Image: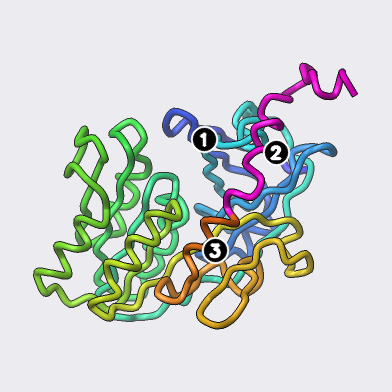
């Protein structure tokens, strides 16, 4: 069991957890993730490693409450223990000196793009960051992203902070203005990543996205996290989670992300001991 060392409420429904996990912290690299299970009856869910401290032996996870397990995780406090946590999993981001890199984070996707941005900056790249959220209250890690970026653009859907609109609006303007970009990395909701990939496609700028499909074992055995990339079927847990956004079959990815919506709604109603469906057999 692994203890929660620190908990912080970043925004409504978005929680940060610093967890004592020295073995994972020792090997974690930007772009990798873990799979955790809160208790014996809990499901296993993947969360990208938002940060790690090898000296302290801790990793940082940022979770948005969108389902039963993330809601239960959000109720945990400092000192509570998570039953099991496996990682680091997945392939690490390819960090090298590309030149000028644009790092894009949408919503809670800012969390996983942060360590990648930091590593790219440390590798000598010029980093332009674009981060956005629905509202100012939902924007996370603005200071942290600014500290590891040469230039940063802020957007919000409602205009309550930064520029009104989407992160893709800023990217489209940079590309149309002729700004030389050597690589784009985008992490966020599926529609955002797809929009980024379509925006950059016409300019031929390589675009990497991080896929987060349904996962079960995280080792490539179950096949639940398969994604279509070009003419091949890939498993996000072992072949990814990062893929060429211009090759991802976005229609299939959207379809697979909605497979268990009905079951998720039932699970959200059955929290704690107040589950009528269980009581009724």
Residue 258 in percent (x, y) is at 58, 49
Q: Secondary structure at mark 1?
A: strand
Residue 188 or 258: which is nearer the viewer? Answer: 258
The residue that disc 2 covers is 263
Frontmost of labels 1 and 2 is 2
- Give the residue pinned by disc 3: 252
Mark nearer the N terminus (1 vs 2): 1
| Residue in the image at 67% along x and 37% along y | 69
- The CA span between labels 2 and 3 is 20 Å
Dot 1 surroundings within 10 Å: few (below 14), some, or many (20 or more)?
A: many
**Which residues make up the magenta segment?**
257-281
Tell me the quadrant of the picture where the N terminus can be found: top right
Residue underneath mark 1:
15
Q: Residue at x 73, y 25 (%)?
A: 270
Q: Is residue 263 magenta?
A: yes
Q: Position of 143 compared to 110: left or right?
A: left
Q: Is residue 79 magenta?
A: no
Q: Quadrant of the C terminus?
A: top right
Mark 2 or 3 closer to N-term? 3
Say if 138 sits above or below 281 in the image.
below
- Give x and y (percent) for residue 230: 50, 80
């Amino acid at each position: 069991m692994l203890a929660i060392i620190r908990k912080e409420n970043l925004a409504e429904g978005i929680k940060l957890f610093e967890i004592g996990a020295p073995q994972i912290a020792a090997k974690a690299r930007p772009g990798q993730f873990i799979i955790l299970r809160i208790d014996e009856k809990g499901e296993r869910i993947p969360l990208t490693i938002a940060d790690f401290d090898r000296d302290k032996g801790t990793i940082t996870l940022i979770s948005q409450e969108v389902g039963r397990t993330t809601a239960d995780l959000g109720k945990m406090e400092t000192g509570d223990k998570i039953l099991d946590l496996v990682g680091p999993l997945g392939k690490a981001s390819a960090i090298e000196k590309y030149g000028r890199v644009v790092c894009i984070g949408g919503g809670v996707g800012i969390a996983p793009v942060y360590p990648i941005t930091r590593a790219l900056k440390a590798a000598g790249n010029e980093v332009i960051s674009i981060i956005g959220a629905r509202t100012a209250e939902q924007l996370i890690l603005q200071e942290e992203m600014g500290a590891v970026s040469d230039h940063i653009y802020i957007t919000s859907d409602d205009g309550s902070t930064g520029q009104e609109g989407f992160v893709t609006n800023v990217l489209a303007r940079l590309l149309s203005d002729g700004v030389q970009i050597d690589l784009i990395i985008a992490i966020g909701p599926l529609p955002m990543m797809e929009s980024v990939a379509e925006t950059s496609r016409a300019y031929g700028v390589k675009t990497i996205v991080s896929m987060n499909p349904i996962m079960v074992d995280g080792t490539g055995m179950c096949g639940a996290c398969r994604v279509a990339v070009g003419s091949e079927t890939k498993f996000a847990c072992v072949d990814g989670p990062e893929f060429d956004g211009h090759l991802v079959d976005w229609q299939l990815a959207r379809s697979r992300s909605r497979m268990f919506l009905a079951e998720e709604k039932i699970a959200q109603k059955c929290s704690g001991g107040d589950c009528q469906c269980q009581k009724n057999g």
